[in-house]
């Protein structure tokens, strides 16, 4: 239980440090996070493209996106 409390406090402190950095360095944080976000988008696109190649891929994508057909 003690480790959980320490971890939670440490995590909270890290979030506060990041929020302060974002507030004080708006352009710098954007350049740091942009490659990560771009990478996530590329990986998602690749995932959907590969899923479309599988049997029932389209149905699975619609299910993932909670689209009713």
Image (cartoon, rainbow, N blue to C red):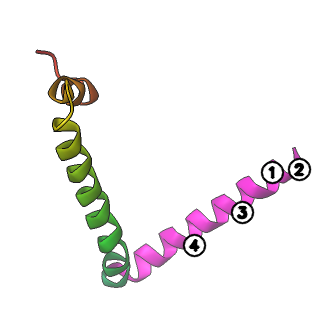
The residue identified by callout 3 is 10
- Name above or below for residue 10 compared with residue 48: below
Count the marks: how many? 4
* Span of residues in magenta: 1-26
The numbered mark at residue 51 is none
For the residues marked 2 and 1, what is the alpha-carbon distance in whole angstroms?
5 Å
* Quadrant of the frame with the C terminus: top left
In percent of width and height, residue 67 lies at 17, 23
Q: Residue at x 25, y 57 (%)?
A: 41
Q: Secondary structure at mark 2?
A: helix
Mark before the other along the chain sequence, 4 or 3: 3
* Quadrant of the frame with the N terminus: top right
Residue 47 located left or right of residue 25: left
Viewer-closest of 5 and 65: 65
Q: Secondary structure at mark 1?
A: helix
The residue identified by callout 4 is 17
Q: Secondary structure at mark 4?
A: helix
């Amino acid at each position: 239980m003690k480790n959980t409390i320490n971890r939670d406090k440490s995590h909270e402190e890290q979030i506060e440090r990041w929020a302060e950095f974002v507030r004080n360095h708006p352009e710098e944080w954007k350049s740091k996070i942009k490659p990560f976000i771009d990478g996530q988008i590329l990986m998602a696109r690749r995932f959907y493209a590969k899923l479309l190649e599988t049997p029932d891929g389209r149905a699975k994508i619609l299910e993932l996106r909670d689209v009713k057909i």
